[in-house]
Amino acid sequence: MKKMSAAKVKIKERKMRNQPSSVQYPSRENNPRNGGDTPVTGGSGSNAPSDIQQTTERQTKPQQRGGWVRGHQKDRGSYAKEIPKHISGGGFAMARAAEVRAMLKAVNKTTASCHVFEALPKHMRRRAMSHNIKRLPRRLRDTANRLREKSLQAGSKKKEQTKAKGKSRKARRRHGNLLLEFNRRQRKNVWLETHIWHAKRFHMVKKWGYCLGDRPTCKCYRPCYRAMSTHCLLQDLSYYCCIELQGEEDKLLAALSQLTSKQAGPTFAAALCLSGQRQGSVVVYRAGQYPSQVLGPVTFIWKPCTHGSTHRQLWIWAHPSIKQDLLPELQSVCQCCEAVVPPVVPVVTPAEVTPTKEPELKPEKAPKPAQSHTKRKRSCKDACEPPAKKILGDGTRSPSTPVTWRSSSTGIVINDLTMDIVRYRLIGPQSHTVLAETLEAATDCNALDKSQPSPLWWPGHCKDESKMNLHKQQADIFNILKDIYSTGELPAGTVLGLAVDDPRLTLPSKKVKALPCVKQTEEVDEEKRRELMLRGVPKNCCRSFLWEQSVRDNVTDNKISEQELNRMRSEVLVPGSRLSPTPLQGRVPVLLVHQPGKQVGHEMSSWGAGWDLLLPKGWGMAFWVPLVYRGVRVGGLNMSLKHSQNKGTPHFPHDYPDCPAGVRFQEEQETELLDKFKRRPPAKRTNYVKHGCLAPFCCPWQQLAEEWELITREEREERKSESQTETTTHTDTVMEQEMTSQPNIGETKPQSFFTVLRNRKSLKLLSGWCRPTTSKGQRFCRIGQVPLLDSSAVRLFLTEHRMSVVWVRLSLLSKGKPELHAMVCVPLTEDLKLLSNKSDCSGPQEPLHKNHFKTRAKHKKKGSNKTAAASSLSPEKTEAKGSVEPNLPIVAKDPKSSSESSTDLIFGLWPDPLPSVTSHCSRVTLGWVTQGDFSLSAGCGEALGFVSVAGLLNTILSQPTEYRGMVLLRNPTSLHYRLAKINIEV
Amino acid sequence: MVRVKSRYLLCEITVSERSQLLQLDDRAVATAVRAAVARTHGDYGAAQCVIGFSVKYLNAHTGIVFLRFPKRCYRLLWSALPFITCIETRGHKIPCVLNCLHVGGTIRTCQKFLIKYNTQQLRQMLPKCKNDEEKQQVRKAILTCCLPGSNRKETEEDFESEDDEEE
């Protein structure tokens, strides 16, 4: 009651408006008033003794309009007389009468609502009463009528106000206006070409400057997984950025070699990739900074070289979140700082809206009966506003932003082809079947078309014999694809160029699932197939005209609109038959790129392999719908995360904590999770302090690496001093660790940032030491010769990678589903004994931690309340409160608490300067999980995450051989540890 | 319906000298009732009197008071009312007696009863008048015992005031 919000006060006022208020003389002696028959109202019966003063003031408003005192309000201020000494009978009668009137008013008016219908008892209410007044009882019709008129007036008033901006729905839905609206809406976040298709079926998220589908609105998690593992899952990856590099081969390679290292696997110069036959993937670093300063993973394709020319073309495909880092880096290594302003080089202006005719204006070009109609439309559009053009490509960029950079010294040209090429990904063993059924190699055009000069690209190509030969070869290979059993059989990263017919022409009338038809083929075909499976696509067949800017633009500009196509179909003699001859515009150059499936690990190899389909812009929907009509499932961002999780590969940017994009992502994720956490009332939150979970939302990798580094260093020193052999038992080590890790973590020396271990050789060594097993840890996998694991080898290893973390896959041995940011811990010897017992007990428990912050939070709360009400407080009280404050750190007993008194405490979370992350719980922490879920492919809980290299080596060194690589996993919301097996897959 | 139910007692404060009535205020009445309950029923009664008890309305001219008691113990509290012999307000002790006229489940029924009771009282006053002037006044009072103005006018006023609030 004391502090009511304004709205509440208002509601209460309204309610009490007709209620009589008490009639009495205010009790203040210093404010005497006259009497007679002029009563004064006081508080309306509020029995709160302390604030009668306030209540009287608060209620001045209702007094003025309510009740029977109205007439006397004016001279209220001049009341000066005392309470009258006597009263007359007449005055008393008047008072009675006045009371009766006030009561009458109160009784006759309902307090609840002014709606007539609500005053009616329930059994008298009728349907649509507000619409048809005659359904009301007669006595209420008058009021209802008046109310209705009033609301109508108000409605019309509102309409007048809004009329200025709102057009009719019909006008809004008109094509041109709709396009304008769409273009306006994608000013901030670019839409992909399939946006509208996705927006109808997906939960959309705005990420990285794009509007992307996150997950379908229908329940299809498992169907999507099944599609990935048995049929085909389709994704629109057009948001990936393509950066084109052109220049002399040696110069390009010299520049790019600074960004990568051979130690982390094949680089840009890998022979197979360089020939253009394969797509390669590398992790890019800042120039010359190899083990540190990662930028992120990219894939690349070289354009197959033409004979005798060293001029090469390279496409680098990168995630949009690293583009802002990658592009300047590329410019600096290639020394390309000259921005080419688009109008100067009109060929390389992909971002600009193509200035030629638009799909929706196309009918104008061909002489049609509908011409006059379109003309009128166009002219009116020209008259009033700039014609609405569909944005193809990147709409957020202004046309004058440079997209091309040229170097005068090296001759390299960098071209930003973002949103210029549509990229679809098909995942699953049957994706080649879907492709083979959807696409058809472009048909030759007849002699008549060939002879005529044409603005289109295809007739020109048909004239060239060598080009047609190439096309025939490519078509042959594409036909062989149909006979392959599974997409995974092909060599990873195969590239196949092709020109195909418009897939809309062969669109089935009904959605049909593309099924493989593996038939017995002849010897020759069989041989060809084997050749394809072993060697991949021959060198010359990798060429595609998609590489050429002019062809791409030509194809984009000359796309037949849907409307035109339908018109042509309607003119076909036999309804539903195929258009023949195929319209000349309907040939599209595409590039098919094979995506490798699961390459690491020992089981489920090549799971999730698929094809990427690269198309010129503008053709997105023309290929999307036919693909969907072949029975594929469509997945969003969520599914790509699951895809990489099942593949056991780190997903970008979730699992790259060392690169700037990954750091940004982690920050975003932390705020998001924290917001979600804070939305719950404190009593319903997980108390992470009690669970001993220091970082439930963001993993402090740097701190982890530093602490483990410190632990190993101190251990080494100790050993040296004692000149002890490395036969320390496991418990000893752990004890040691716990002891050493406790004090002064703060005083680590020079700032060196943690790195993710990507050195192939080291990874292989580490993997061997961890004794790889199958997913549930039942069988051991055979591996090659691994050097013996002993302390000297470990020491040698650690000198190189003392601040590293390593990507591991953890599979749970029994029950449990790991979650995001679950802790990976070192098991004690007792825990390992549990394992040998084979009992059902699945793991040890973490003792409940004490929440030291509880008392502090309480005090804080009280304190803040007090300060808020400080004005009314006596000085002694505030002082008393102040004296409590210094005691707090003693209560909290936390070594860091003094420093954090200023930070705000969130109940259930450890405040900011974290204590030692490794030794906080009863089991020493090794690392955290970044992706965890029940794995449908392995049939058990599986987690992917990072652990500290130093910690891992320390652990496996002290473990007996048969239990090597066993760790404990604990979810942030649980106290239960689960045993898991570490696998490092190379 | 689920709600906290209470009983409303419509009481008349009877005093020997009318002018003393004007000094009353709701706080004084509440304290007097509390004190009486505490005296008769001890701590238990006093505790029952804490929650759900309030003086809803007090007319210092006519001595009408609405007391609200929680339903479960209103009989207990009611039984203490006859023990009120004086109410202390503004430094004076006013000797008085609380006369319960009506017990209702809602304020509304109490109000309805009060209307009936008051008009009845006014009519009884008329023959007892001592002089003409007084008679005139009482007559006038009886005539004004209906809602001021017609119904229609009132509702319109209502709507206008609503509009004001919205703006």
Image (cartoon, coloured by chain):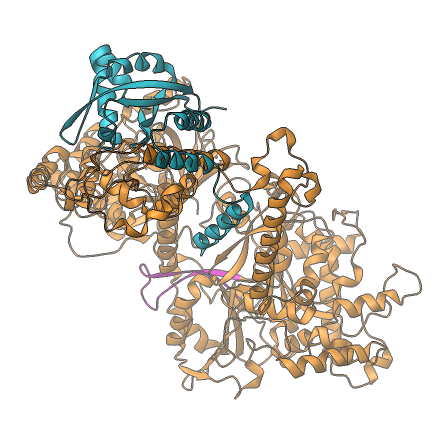
As drawn, which residue projects farthest toward the bottom? A344
Percent coordinates x, y for residue A115 in the rendering: 56, 42
Relative side of A72 to A853, left or right: right
**Closer to the camera, A747 or A33?**
A33
Query: Residue A337: percent from the left, percent from the top?
Result: 40, 81
Give the main secondary structure, helix, strand or loop, of the magenta stretch: strand
Tally of numbered tags: 0
- Which image quarter: residue A689? top left
Residue A20 vs B103, above or below: the answer is: below
In the displayed structure image, the side of residue A228 where residue A630 appears, left or right: right
| A170, above or below A60, in the image | below
- Is B124 or A51 nearer to us in this picture? B124
For chain A, what colour was chosen? orange
- What residue occupies the far right of the structure in this picture? A573
Instruction: State left or right for residue A727 relative to residue A453.
Output: left
Where residue A605 sits: x, y (%)?
55, 44
Does residue A767 appear in the picture of this structure? Answer: no
Residue at the (45%, 38%) spot, across then down? B144
Image position of A833 (left or right of A315): left
Q: Can you tell which chain is drawn cyan?
A: B
Residue in the foreground of this view, choosing between A754 and A731 = A754
The reply to whether the magenta stretch includes residue A287 is yes
Q: Quadrant of residue B52?
A: top left
Q: Is residue A731 visible?
A: yes
B67 above or below A546?
above
In the image, residue A946 lies in the stretch drawn in magenta: no
Q: Quadrant of the N terminus of chain A?
A: top left
**Image quadrant assignment for residue A946:** top left
Q: Which residues are magenta?
A: A280-300
Between residues A688 and A159, which one lies in front from this camera angle?
Answer: A159
Residue farthest toward the front in the current orientation of the protein = B132
Where is residue A133 drawn, in percent x and y? 68, 44
